[in-house]
Image (cartoon, helix red, strand yellow):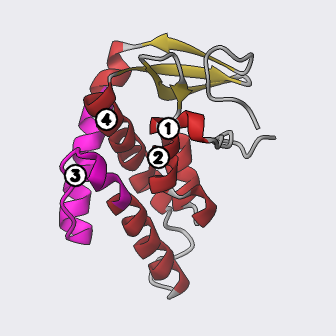
């Protein structure tokens, strides 16, 4: 697994205003989807982030019950909104800059904290919505906020 900090050799960051604009729009899409599809209110508070995990669990249950056809990809519909929402909550509460993370030859939307740590929540949200409960979104946000308490996020391609 790679480190999520800009001081390590694994990732670099470049700020990008277009990504910042996309982040705001996709985060608002998450708010709308939460309200209309899950009857959940997202308000950009840190306490709202665990609601994303609850919605991901609802997707898991629907998938297990056969209510989501194999051809439907919740990770594509919800991954970007959920990922950008996580980042926007962090940015609004702690300060961060949106842009592109360059990691292992991939260029991924992500953010850099004021302390210099680099995170790419869209990849994490996509992994979670593909049905991997070990990619718990509430825990991920906790690690983003408290990197000194351990934990690393997996690379978007599973570290391969």
Residue 23 highlighted magenta (yes or no): yes
- The answer to whether 143 is drawn above or below residue 31 in the figure is above
In primary-sequence order, the first of circles 4 and 1 is 4
Query: What range of the chain is rendered magenta?
Result: 22-50
Look at mark 1 in the image and give the residue it sits on: 146
Callout 2 environment at 10 Å: few (<14), some (14 to 19), or many (20+)? some
- The answer to whether 58 is drawn above or below residue 122 in the figure is below
Give yes or no for contact between labels 1 and 2 (Cβ–Cβ under 8 Å): yes
Which label lies toward us, 3 or 2?
2
In primary-sequence order, the first of circles 3 and 4 is 3
Which label lies toward us, 4 or 1?
1
Callout 1 environment at 10 Å: few (<14), some (14 to 19), or many (20+)? few
Considering every residue shown, the one lying at the far front of the view is 149
Look at mark 3 in the image and give the residue it sits on: 31
Residue 122 vs residue 53, the one in the foreground: 53
Look at mark 2 in the image and give the residue it sits on: 142
The percent coordinates of residue 62 (x first, y second) are: 45, 80
Q: Which mark is residue 135?
A: none
Give yes or no for contact between labels 3 and 4 (Cβ–Cβ under 8 Å): no
Figure quadrant of the N terminus? top right
**Does residue 132 appear in this view?**
no
Look at mark 4 in the image and give the residue it sits on: 88
In primary-sequence order, the first of circles 4 and 2 is 4
The percent coordinates of residue 152 (x first, y second) are: 66, 40
**Local SS, label 4:** helix
**Local SS, label 1:** loop
- The answer to whether 86 is drawn above or below residue 21 in the figure is below
Q: Main secondary structure of the magenta part?
A: helix
Callout 3 environment at 10 Å: few (<14), some (14 to 19), or many (20+)? some
Residue 6 highlighted magenta (yes or no): no
**Local SS, label 3:** helix
**Spatial CA span between label 4 and label 2:** 14 Å
């Amino acid at each position: 697994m790679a480190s999520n900090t800009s001081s390590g050799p694994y990732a670099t960051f470049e700020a990008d205003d277009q990504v910042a604009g996309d982040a705001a729009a996709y985060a608002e899409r998450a708010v709308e989807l939460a309200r209309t599809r899950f009857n959940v209110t997202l308000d950009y508070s840190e306490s709202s982030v665990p609601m994303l995990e609850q919605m991901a669990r609802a997707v898991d249950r629907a998938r297990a019950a056969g209510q989501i056809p194999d051809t439907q990809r919740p990770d594509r519909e919800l991954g970007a909104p959920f990922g950008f929402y996580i980042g926007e909550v962090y940015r609004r509460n702690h300060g961060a800059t949106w842009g592109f993370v360059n990691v292992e030859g991939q260029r991924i939307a992500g953010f850099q904290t004021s302390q210099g740590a680099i995170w790419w929540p869209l990849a994490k949200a996509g992994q979670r919505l593909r049905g991997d409960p070990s990619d718990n979104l509430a825990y991920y946000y906790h690690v983003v906020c408290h990197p000194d308490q351990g934990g690393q996020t997996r690379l978007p391609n599973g570290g391969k």
